[in-house]
Amino acid sequence: MSTTTGACAHAESRMQAYLDKLLSPVDTTIVEEHLAVCGDCAAAYRFELKLRQHVKACCGGRSDEDHCREELLAKLKSCCGGAADEQSAN
């Protein structure tokens, strides 16, 4: 975000919980109202949402974390020539 305000920092710090629908109704409303008026935060939200959708699609639609990790590592190995092995070892 290019111009971070207190409201931006609040929304950004709660973005993952908001995407997971884990926020209280009050925090949900605060984040939604901010996203409605802040283009930078709304763009960040759309990016995170699309990233999650892409990861889920790469995992065959499953949300099982272990399966998803294995699936993504296998795809990275096939496209990156084993570079994923080096990254996961670190």
Image (cartoon, grey):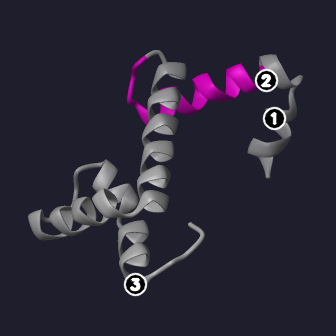
* Majority secondary structure in the magenta region: helix
Q: Are marks 1 and 2 in contact (CB under 8 Å)?
A: yes
Q: Earlier in the sequence, mark 3 or mark 2?
A: 3
| Residue 72 versus residue 51 in the image, above or below | above
Measured along the vertical axis of the image, is residue 32 above or below residue 4? above
Return the mark for residue 77.
2
Left or right, residue 22 beside residue 84? left
Magenta part of the protein: which range?
Answer: 61-77
Q: Is residue 40 left or right of residue 23?
A: right
Mark number displayed over residue 85 = 1
Q: Where residue 37 appears, x then y in whole percent?
A: 32, 63
Q: Nearer the viewer, residue 40 or 25?
A: 40
The image's mark for residue 37 is none
Mark pair 3, 1: CA separation: 40 Å
Identify residue type, mark 2. Lys
State the image coordinates of residue 12 (x, y, percent, origin top left). 43, 67
> Who's the residue at 23% across and 63% down the image?
33
Apparent side of residue 62 relative to residue 34 in the rendered image (left or right): right
Q: How many marks?
A: 3
Q: Is 47 a magenta residue?
A: no
Q: How far apart are the two marked residues, 1 and 2, measured between alpha carbons?
A: 7 Å
Mark closer to the chain start, 1 or 2: 2
Mark 2 residue element: helix
Q: Nearer the viewer, mark 1 or mark 2?
A: 2
State the residue position of label 3.
6
Q: Nearer the viewer, mark 3 or mark 1?
A: 3
Residue 39, placed above or below residue 34: above
Task: List x then y, in percent, for residue 7.
Answer: 36, 78
Looking at the rendering, which quadrant does residue 49 occupy?
Answer: top left
Q: Outermost residue toward the bottom?
A: 6
